[in-house]
Image (cartoon, rainbow, N blue to C red):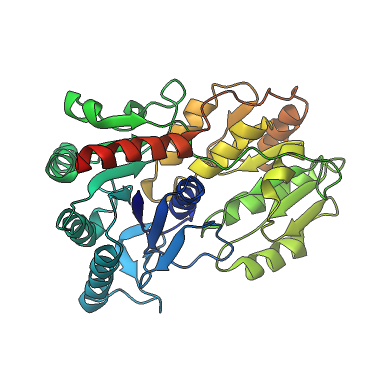
Amino acid sequence: MKLCIVVTHLLGTGHLRRAAVLGRAAASAGVDVTILSGGMPVTGLETGNARLVQLPPLRSDGVDFSTLLDDTGTPASDAYKTQRSDRLAQEITAFAPDVLLTELYPFGRRGLAHEFTTAIQTARGLPRPAAVAASIRDILAPPSKPKRVVQTEAVLAEYYDAVLVHSDPDVVPLSASWPVSPFLQERLRYTGFVAPAAPSGESGIAGQGDILVSAGGGAVGRNLFEKAVQAARLMPGQKFRLLVGGQDAEVVRASLIAEAPDNVTVEGLRPDFRNLLACAACSLSLCGYNTAMDILQTGVPALFVPFDDGNEVEQTLRARCLSQLTGIDMMIGAEITAQSLAARLGALCATQRRPVSSHQFDGAMRSIEFLEDLAHARAA
């Protein structure tokens, strides 16, 4: 089977990293994989034997997803967007996939509808038309208007064979964030969660027993780090370790180091992050999909502070679902004080460690099985 994944991350890196996990798993199973990435380049991305093609990149203007910026940081011109669409068509025509998988679209990325449609129509127009499926996380941005649901289902009806939902419906069903009609229900395929293999959690690594504070590799999270430093002053006997990434990471790290007390270590992102998390006393983080998977897989006590700028609700909905599990708590960023944060973290550090989750984490391989079924059905 030949699989083409089309993905554009605009703010954080979660969409691309999930696509990379899928691509890596598919390639390890003998699938010929091409990932067409339309977001900003991400260093250190592990794609295994999957081929990664970088399109002319776009990013959002902060949380303003209606304004897309090019690689120079200026609003993307129509010519630039056409260049992206043309490149998509060229790559798909040359690769000739059996299955085209679109990350998030048509449930999101409506501002890129033209290029996704170009990709789909190109794949459908091949001498041997490709099957088409959508890849979505557990929680979506709820539709702001009823017509969004109608428009999404119209696109699904015209082009799509299935929708892969990377979740365990017993933990986070799609209906928690998106209306699931009988039409949509027929096309849903719950794959389980998509995550790398569980970390070993070996002992002896720097940071064992710390409160680990992280915000992924995207462009948000500075406020969380600053609140963590304030809480650390009230917990002098507990070590904190802040892992700071993003485009302005060096500036943010320098600022945090200047104000941090002695029990705080500030570092860049670490390749052994997941092993470190498994050895931490507690995790303090946002609640993106990939971070949530790490928390569930390691069993570490965790406090989620979901990203909610610009009326974003995805992480809040996910955090509410997961906070029903033992050893997981949540706080709303605007309500946090140094005292309240220190109290919550102290309580979690004293919590008996949660057993490693038994929820479905074979989502990558199950996704490949679903996609192979689609390819066979299309070829029949």
Q: State the residue in front, 375 or 311.
A: 375
> Residue shown at 65%/58% (left/top)?
244
> Does 299 sit above or below residue 204?
above
Q: State the residue in front, 346 or 108.
A: 108
Q: Is residue 97 visible?
A: yes
**Whole-percent x, y for residue 288 in the image:** 50, 43
> Does 93 sit above or below residue 121?
below
| Occupied quadrant, residue 197 | top right
> Does 99 sit above or below residue 377?
below
Q: State the residue in front, 9 or 225.
A: 9
**Whole-percent x, y for residue 31 in the image:** 42, 49
Position of residue 197 in the picture relative to residue 140 (left or right): right
Position of residue 183 in the picture relative to residue 217 (left or right): left
Q: State the residue in front, 230 or 12.
A: 12
> Residue shown at 31%/49% (left/top)?
101
Position of residue 301 in the picture relative to residue 148 (left or right): right
Q: Quadrant of the C terminus?
A: top left
**Whole-percent x, y for residue 135 in the image:** 35, 43
